[in-house]
Image: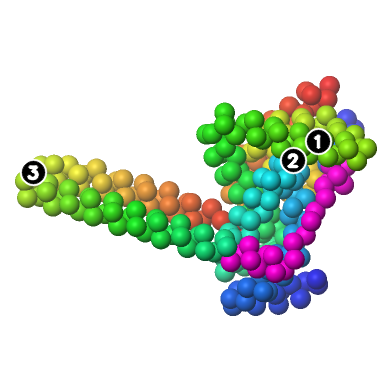
Amino acid sequence: MEQTEETLWIKRAKQGDDAAFTALYRHHYSFLYRYLMKLTLQQELTEEIMQETMLKAYMKLSSFRGDSLFSTWLMSIASRQFLDHQKKRKREQTREGKANQEAIRRFKWDVQQKGHTWHDMWDALNELKAQERAPILLHYYYGFTYPEIASMLGVREGTVKSRVHHGIKKIRKEWD
Amino acid sequence: MKEDRFTDRLKEGLQELDEQIEVEKPSEQALMLMLKQAKAKEKKRFKQEVLAYIIVSLTIMTLFAAAITHLPIIFILLQVVSVPLCVVVGIKEYQHIKGGSSL
């Protein structure tokens, strides 16, 4: 999908064309799914957040001004949905904790079944706080700058820097 | 130099993780259905919230009416407490709504 074509889809979706919106969302589905899987390492949770992100994007589409790429806008919504989820889960940690670990183990098993190695680094990343994991991924893997991440997550730039710093420190500690 | 090595290692690790992720892209029909269901769920949630709002409002109004007619001092106290509370709730709600994305 070219940029001009995407702009056209967005325009149509803003006018209430649900088919245009789903086509647009489908186009970015894989990209967004991969991002969320790296954040959660859990298929079920990723799918749940994907659904929530779709609804949120649908409801907030009129606020998309086009200052960023549509994919970046979706990532921003998905990140916030993920962080909200983690906050809720934290409150219900004892009940949900076991289910989370089980879901991660399933993904680990899938990877190993295919003959691939499960890296300790993925565990280290997963052990970070959600609020540290998201900016690290956005900065080091997707190449977003600190001000961009701050805008995406709705926090101050200094907060992003501090969370990345603490998260990286923990990963380094695991590696050393 | 050490920092570069760390960054490269981190990127490589994440790239390898990305390669392990299999995506089953849903069809457009499935997404349409998903959207329809999500919209219906949201509508139901909205209705429940409105209902809860009406019930709470009526309860408060009843209490206020009782306070005005029977205990004016409690009415004044409630006014003093509720005005700043409304401001705080308003600010929180605005932040929550704004929380979508500013991009």
At 10% from the left edge and 42% from the top edge, which residue is drawn? Answer: B73
At 43% from the left edge and 48% from the top edge, which residue is drawn? Answer: B92
Q: Label 3, label 1: how many angstroms apart (C-alpha)?
A: 65 Å
Front-lying residue, B93 or A159: B93
Q: Is residue B25 magenta?
A: yes
Disc 3 marks a residue whose amino acid type is: Leu
Find numbered disc 2 in the image and state the secondary structure of the residue it sits on: loop
Q: Is residue A130 magenta?
A: no
Please tell me the numbered disc located at residue A108.
1
Give the labeled residue for mark 2: A41
Which image quadrant is residue A109 in? Answer: top right
10 Å crowding of disc 1: few (<14), some (14-19), many (20+) = many
Q: Residue furthest right?
A: A115
Which quarter of the image is occupied by the N terminus of chain B? top right
Judge depth for marks 3 and 1 and give the one in front: 1
Which image quadrant is residue B29 in? Answer: bottom right
Which image quadrant is residue B55 in? Answer: bottom left
Give coordinates of residue A79: x percent, y percent: 65, 49
Q: Are marks 2 and 1 in contact (CB under 8 Å)?
A: yes
At 38% from the left edge and 52% from the top edge, which residue is drawn? Answer: B90
10 Å crowding of disc 3: few (<14), some (14-19), many (20+) = few
Front-lying residue, A131 or A139: A131
Q: Is residue A66 visible in the rendered structure shown here?
A: no
